[in-house]
Each structure stands twice: as C-alpha cells, then as structure tokens.
Image (tube, rainbow, N blue to C red):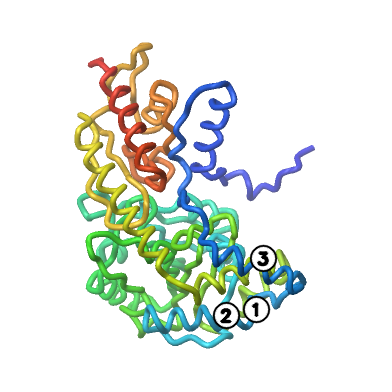
C-alpha cells in the first residue's frame, strides 16, 4: 500500500534543507561542521519587533484574523509599496501569508492547470520548480550563466515562451547568484512579455534591501507599469529584518488573482498567526536602522568571501550584487582526485568532498539548475566565514591530478 500521491514522485525535498540536515547529522557524531547551507541572517530580530508581538499577545490578539491579513498590516504593506517602490495598491490587492514561499504556492495553486508551463531562469531558487511540478505544471529553465551575469536576456525569454506558458518567475537580487536587474534590463524583458499576453509575471523581491556597492533597487512593477494587471510582486520581512522564523510574507497584484490566492489560503492555513502579523507591522512601520546595519554587514562579508575565494585555485566568484550568498564556480576542481582516490566529476561530488574532508556544508549548483557551481550562505559571522574559507582552501589543496 502506498501512502504517497503520484504527483509527489517528481518532487524533491529542499536541497538547502537537505544540506543543513547532512551537516547536523555529522555534528551529532561529534564532527565540527560549519553549516553554510541554509540562507538566513544570523542577527537577532530587532527588539521593537519582538516587543510588538509580545504586546499583541498580551492584548489578546491571539484569535483568527482575516485570511489575507489584518487590515492594519495590509495597509502597512500598501504604504511600503507606495513609499519605497512608487507602486499604488489597495487593500484588496494585498495578501499576507506564512512566508513568501506560501505566497508563491498560493499563486500557483490558484492559477496552474495541468501541463501549464512556468519559465524559471536558472539558476533559480530551489523551491520554484518543485512547487510548479507539485501543482501539475512544467518548469522551463533557460540557463542564464555567468556570461550573462546570471540574468535572463530578452532573447532567452522569447525562446522559452510557448502557447502553454502561464508564468515567468524573476528573483532579484537572485538566490543563489545575487544578480540584480536594472531598469533597462526589466524594460527589455517587459517588451517581450507585451507580445505574450497569456504570461503572468511573478517578481520575487524578498532580497530587495540587500544590495551592494550603492545599487538602487528597481521593482518589476516600477519598470513595467503597463503589465500591472499581469504582475504579482512577492516580498516579506524574513530577510531584511532577520525574521525568517516568524513566517510572514506578503504580495501585491491584480485583485482577481489576489482573491483567488486568498481563497486557497482560507482553505489551507486560514491565516498567519496574529502576533506574527503584529511583529511584521512593527517591522514595516518602525525604525529602519537595522535594515542599513544588516546590509552593511552583508556587504562586508561578501567582500571577505570574494577575496577568500580568489585565493583558492580552481574556484571562481564574480562579486555578488546583492542577497547573502556566494555562487562559487568549481569547474577547476572537476577531474581532480581526492586523498581517498575518488574523482570529482560534478558539483555534487565537490559539495560532498567539502563536507566530508573540509567539514563545510554547502549546496550543489545542480539544485539551482546551473553547474558546476556550489552555493554557500554568507549570512554568518566574519570569523566563521574566515574559518570556512580556510577549510575549503585546505581541502582543495589536498586534491591531486587524476
């Protein structure tokens, strides 16, 4: 007897979570492993946000809320889009969910029919293709390599669209690459999309505030206002405010789409926990100093990792433009022999070797659709990153020619 639905057979667990679990398993055996697999800030959530959740609970805000979020939080989200992105949305065009991932899942559940295609530029966030497959869709993954700055080009987009295309996903700054799209980049993609009116656009902007070297963020909605009725902007408080475990994401889009997503949510989780929504409200409306402080730390760590990787033969790393990851090229290690005699044939082998020989956990580029690379999170203390790079360097130095 099988307990598993057939649709689940093509879906893989989260690769980043799997990497973290592998690190935990070694730690349980007494091995000192540095886990750079999961992407979450190592900073504590700012105190005023914690206090807001505490006070909300003490006031009795512990009951169900409206499925799409409290009126106060949806208004704060609308104000945020207006203030920071120049986008005007009303309350019925806003949805609050348990993290940005649930927003995306709701959108796909509400819109995908069996066989519909979603264009997911690779490298992509590991959950995108799995959610598409889980809901009966077909991922289409044009490769956007280092030569294009890990960005989707208009030519690649045009080639990927078919009559079955329902969605295009954009993620900026990108996970895992850190790639950022400028105004001209987005307008060029918008010109292609204008010729294909059946395609919806999901712009995942969760790393919006983590930009480096003075870059200014441009939302897809700002660049292509003519596509407003086909665009869903996804964001949340997890990354910018060190709130990954609070699970509050939000989105803005055309009212009929948001209404359908709200229906999905009302029949699944009902709503986000009320104290968590109070915390998100405090994050969006309270002091913003922490956002700049976190960004400065992430840039310092980015610089540290770029310099460290440059000193390791066989590895490459163009400086990420945003987010808190390093997508490290490892083509120079393929074909090398490990001390125990194994040959590294792909990035999955490289990741396994770095874990077992260097005791550093990372995620293979294959999980993101572009090889040979591996991703590490740079959202950890400087000293930890220095030690991790030292371990990686020593492990690489131990390799020999096959």
Q: Pointers 1 and 3 in contact (CB under 8 A)? A: no
In this rendering, the label closer to the viewer, 1 or 3: 3
Q: Distance between the residues labelled 1 and 3?
A: 17 Å
Q: How far apart are marks 2 and 1 (CA)?
A: 6 Å
Q: Nearer the viewer, residue 329 or 355?
A: 355
Q: Relative to 296, is 74 above or below?
A: below
Position of residue 370 in the picture relative to residue 314 (left or right): right
Q: Where residue 47 sits in the image (x, y, percent)?
A: 54, 62
The residue at 27%/20% (across/down) is 336
Sequence-wise, which precedes: disc 1 or disc 3?
3
Q: What residue lies at 33% left-to-right and 45% top-to-bottom?
A: 326
According to the picture, the residue beneath numbered tag 2 turns out to be 74
| Front residue of 363 and 312 | 312
Q: Would you name the residue on which mark 3 appears?
A: 54
Q: Which residue is drawn at 25% across and 74% down?
A: 183
Residue 229 drawn above or below residue 264 = below
Q: Count the labels in the image.
A: 3
Cβ–Cβ under 8 Å for marks 3 and 2:
no
Mark 2 neighbour class, 10 Å CA radius: few under 14, some 14 to 19, many 20 or more: many
The residue mark sitting in front, 3 or 2, is 3
Mark 1 burial class by Cα count in 10 Å: few <14, some 14-19, many 20+: many
| Quadrant of res 311 | top left
Res. 168 visible in picture: no
User: Alpha-carbon distance for marks 3 and 2?
Assistant: 20 Å
Say whether marks 2 and 1 touch (CB < 8 Å).
yes
Q: Which residue was labeled with disc 1?
A: 70
Helix, strand or loop under label 3: helix
């Amino acid at each position: 007897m099988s307990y598993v639905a057939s649709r689940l057979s093509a879906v893989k667990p989260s690769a980043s979570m799997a990497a973290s679990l592998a690190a935990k398993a070694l730690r349980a055996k007494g091995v000192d492993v540095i886990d750079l697999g999961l992407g979450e800030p190592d900073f504590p959530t700012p105190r005023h946000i914690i206090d807001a959740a505490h006070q909300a609970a003490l006031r009795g805000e512990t009951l169900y809320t409206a499925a799409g979020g409290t009126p106060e939080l949806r208004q704060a989200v609308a104000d945020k889009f207006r203030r920071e992105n120049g986008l005007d949305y009303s309350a019925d065009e806003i949805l609050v969910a348990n993290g940005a991932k649930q927003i995306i899942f709701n959108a796909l559940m509400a819109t995908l029919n069996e066989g519909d295609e979603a264009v997911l530029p690779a490298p992509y966030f590991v959950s995108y293709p799995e959610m598409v497959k889980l809901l009966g869709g077909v991922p289409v993954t044009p490769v956007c390599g280092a030569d294009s700055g890990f960005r989707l080009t208009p030519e690649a987009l045009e080639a990927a669209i078919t009559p079955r295309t329902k969605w295009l996903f954009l993620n900026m700054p990108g996970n895992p690459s850190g790639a950022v799209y400028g105004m001209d980049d987005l307008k060029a993609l918008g010109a292609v999309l204008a010729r294909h009116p059946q395609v919806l656009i999901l712009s995942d902007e969760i790393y919006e505030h983590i930009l480096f070297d003075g870059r200014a963020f441009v939302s897809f909605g700002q660049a292509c206002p003519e596509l407003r009725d086909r665009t869903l902007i996804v964001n949340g408080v997890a990354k910018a405010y060190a709130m990954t475990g609070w699970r509050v994401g939000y989105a803005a889009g055309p009212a009929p789409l948001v209404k359908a997503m709200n229906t999905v949510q009302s029949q699944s989780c009902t709503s986000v926990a009320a104290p968590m929504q109070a915390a998100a409200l405090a994050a969006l409306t309270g002091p913003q100093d922490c956002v700049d402080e976190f960004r400065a730390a992430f840039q310092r760590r980015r610089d540290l990792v770029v310099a460290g990787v440059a000193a390791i033969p066989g590895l490459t790393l163009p400086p990420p433009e945003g987010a808190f990851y390093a997508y490290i090229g490892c083509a120079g290690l393929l074909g090398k022999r490990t001390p125990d005699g194994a040959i590294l044939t792909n990035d999955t082998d490289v990741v396994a070797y770095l874990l077992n020989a260097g005791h550093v956990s990372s995620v293979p580029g294959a999980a993101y659709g572009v090889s040979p690379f591996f991703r590490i999170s740079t959202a950890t203390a400087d000293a930890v990153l220095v030690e991790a790079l030292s371990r990686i360097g020593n492990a690489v130095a131990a390799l020999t020619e096959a």
